[in-house]
């Protein structure tokens, strides 16, 4: 499909060939586990048979002999050399095709097993157009999907982009209307129109340069335009007001324009550069913040420098054409001697005179105001990247290290059912064993752990997230106290896994683990913290059967025989690979008994 760069699929549980061996039949025919393992390990091995030169040609040799079906695999001879009877694999084992018992990851959607598909777009395409085309294609394929298969969209980037951009454009237009309205009220109609025209030209010029530089119109770039709006009128206001005052003082129009530009050019340039440098650390940062917010700095750099240039070139032309089209009024002529004779300026001068006379009182008041501002700032929530308005949140679940993935899946199903019953929940998608594929820039999935699961929940309204997260945390604490659970919303920008992260470095692992435990206890003791977790997790359990080399030699049993027998009895093992076209299916020997055998380690 045009515009689609890559399609990633997750949650597919791999198939395997199960070889269920009868130990009794194998022993009756004098076949050992090591002999059978060696035979199965050579299944469909890819090896080079060389090539032969025929005349001027070099032709590759590719002998036949690969198994083409499971039935042919059952005909594999496994009897030892010199045996009186021929033994085939099917004589001592049952072969079947199935799904692996312990996949690396399992996906759920709305409580049912699922497969996810992530579609990435080619850079530079219109995401909204490609999203509509993809939606139309899915509707065409709906009639051909097998019975019982449902297609659900958890995150539609095209719809999210359209919603976000429309909201930002609305905010941008509202901000523009407010700025222009204030200018018209306080600067006068003619002055306000000139500054508004300069603002419009600056915005259009910024959009043009953004297009040339390949800067897309998205959240951050639109937000930068909104931030720049209040600054894009400053230079034009200085020029217009300076010319007005010079004209009131009797200067000719061109002389007033020339004087104001020469006097204001460098100070305005300095102020513009300072404003740009204030945002430079964000755009020039080499971490994920710089990657995410790069366009913020770029748009402000373009718009503010363009604003300075237009204030010195376009604004004077508009002043000459529009502002003084008519002769100055009589009131303006009366104020030539002193343009600051108005009542506002006289009141300001009187207040300034009193403050300068009462120096000590003025300094005390200013110091008190500064201290009050600093104190009040402590109540402002410090959050560089706020939570997104997208109605999605995550539930991260950590069981004790070593938990089997099937046990993790069972627990996740219970939590899914609890979440699905909450009001406002639209869709749940769970990934057991690892995090999900990256579907937004700010998301980073967890690597593979059999004791980890993540539930992604989509709500119908982001205002309903808080009560649902509280319910989830309380429900998990009551029903699964052994689970370390945390909830998290989508952030506008990059963020860590936790609000507070402590890194402890040193050469001794035991000392590090002890120190980490102490730090964790200190953090957990604070009532404002929850979900305190050590990324080394708890120590895993191990059972160590005691093997006697002396007895082993007497009985003709070495350590490898013991290892193979234990592996086959309790967990099963990989015996080889079965080639099926371009796919390689593992040939596994399943465990002889249930994996949940009830064995308990001795204390």
Image: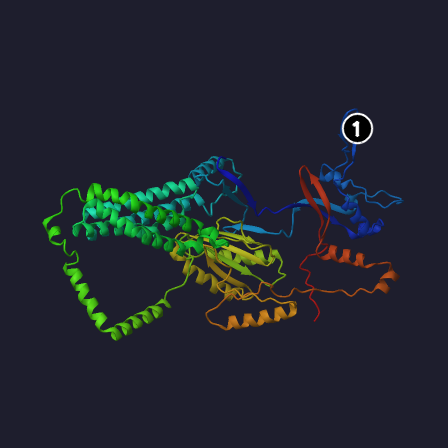
Q: Position of residue 19 (x, y in %)?
A: 73, 47
Quarter the C terminus occupies: bottom right
> Depth check: 495 or 579 in front?
495
> Depth check: 493 or 431 in front?
493
Give the image's coloring scheme.
rainbow
Q: Position of residue 563 (x, y in %)?
A: 77, 58
The quadrant in which residue 400 appears is bottom right
In this rendering, does residue 133 appear at all?
yes
Give the crowd class for mark 1: few <14, some 14-19, many >=20 residues within 10 Å.
Answer: few
Q: Residue at x 82, y 49 (%)?
A: 35
Element class at badge 1: strand
Q: What residue is pinned by disc 1?
A: 53
Q: Is residue 481 left or right of residue 563?
A: left
Q: Position of residue 332 (x, y in %)?
A: 13, 51
Q: Position of residue 32 (x, y in %)?
A: 82, 51
Q: Is residue 373 above or below residue 232?
A: below
Q: Is residue 112 above or below residue 546?
A: above
In this rendering, does residue 233 appear at all?
no
* Count of all numbered marks drawn on residues in the image: 1
> Depth check: 252 or 218 in front?
252
Residue extending farthest to the top is: 55
> Depth check: 543 or 449 in front?
449
Q: Is residue 193 left or right of residue 486?
A: left
């Amino acid at each position: 499909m045009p515009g689609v760069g890559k399609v990633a699929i997750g949650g597919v549980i791999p198939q395997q060939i199960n070889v269920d061996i009868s130990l009794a039949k194998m022993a009756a025919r004098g076949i050992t586990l090591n002999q059978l393992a060696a035979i199965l390990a050579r299944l469909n091995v890819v090896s080079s048979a060389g090539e032969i030169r025929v005349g001027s040609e070099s032709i590759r040799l590719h002998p036949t002999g690969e198994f083409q079906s499971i039935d042919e695999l059952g005909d594999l001879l496994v009897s030892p050399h010199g045996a009186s009877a021929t033994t085939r694999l099917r004589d001592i084992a049952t072969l079947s095709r199935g799904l692996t018992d312990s996949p690396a990851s399992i996906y759920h959607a709305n409580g049912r097993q699922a497969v996810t598909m992530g579609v990435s777009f080619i850079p530079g395409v219109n995401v909204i157009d490609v999203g509509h085309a993809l939606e139309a294609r899915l509707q065409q394929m709906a009639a051909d999907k097998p019975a019982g298969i449902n297609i659900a969209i958890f995150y539609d980037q095209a719809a999210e982009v359209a919603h976000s951009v429309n909201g930002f454009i609305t905010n941008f237009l509202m901000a523009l209307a407010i700025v222009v309205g204030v200018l018209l009220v306080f600067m006068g109609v003619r002055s306000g129109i000139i500054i508004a025209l300069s603002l419009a030209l600056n915005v259009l010029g910024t959009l043009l340069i953004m297009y040339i530089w390949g800067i897309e119109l998205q959240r951050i770039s639109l937000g930068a335009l909104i931030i720049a709006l209040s600054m894009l009128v400053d230079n034009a206001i200085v020029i217009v007001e300076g010319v007005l005052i010079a004209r009131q003082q009797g200067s000719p129009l061109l002389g007033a324009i020339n004087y104001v530009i020469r006097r204001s050019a460098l100070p305005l340039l300095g102020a513009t550069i300072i404003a740009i440098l204030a945002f430079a650390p964000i755009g020039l940062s080499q971490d994920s913040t710089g990657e995410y917010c790069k366009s913020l700095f770029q748009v402000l750099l373009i718009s503010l420098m363009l604003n300075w240039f237009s204030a010195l070139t376009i604004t004077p032309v508009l002043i000459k054409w529009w502002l003084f089209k008519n002769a100055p009024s009589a009131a303006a002529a009366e104020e030539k001697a002193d343009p600051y004779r108005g009542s506002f300026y006289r009141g300001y001068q009187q207040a300034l005179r009193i403050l300068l006379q009462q120096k000590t009182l003025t300094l005390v008041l200013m110091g008190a105001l500064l201290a009050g501002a600093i104190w009040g700032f402590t109540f402002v929530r410090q959050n560089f990247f706020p939570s997104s308005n997208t109605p999605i949140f995550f539930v991260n679940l950590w069981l004790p290290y070593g938990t089997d993935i099937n046990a993790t899946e069972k627990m996740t199903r219970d939590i899914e059912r609890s979440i699905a019953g909450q009001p406002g929940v639209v869709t749940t998608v769970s990934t057991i064993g690892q995090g999900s594929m990256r579907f937004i820039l700010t998301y980073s999935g967890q690597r593979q752990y059999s004791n980890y699961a993540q539930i992604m929940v989509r709500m119908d309204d982001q205002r309903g997230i808080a009560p649902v997260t509280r319910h989830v945390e309380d429900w998990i604490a009551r029903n699964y106290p052994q689970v370390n659970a945390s909830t998290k919303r989508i952030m506008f920008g990059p963020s860590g896994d936790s609000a507070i992260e402590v890194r402890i470095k040193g050469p001794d692992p035991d000392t590090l683990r002890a120190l980490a435990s102490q730090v964790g206890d200190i953090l957990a003791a604070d009532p404002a913290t929850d979900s305190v977790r050590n990324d080394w997790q708890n120590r895993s359990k191990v059972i160590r059967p005691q093997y006697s080399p002396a007895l082993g030699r007497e009985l003709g049993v070495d350590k490898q025989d013991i290892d193979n027998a234990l592996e086959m009895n309790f967990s099963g093992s990989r015996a080889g690979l079965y080639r099926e076209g371009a796919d390689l299916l593992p040939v596994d020997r399943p465990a002889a008994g249930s994996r949940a055998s009830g064995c308990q380690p001795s204390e």
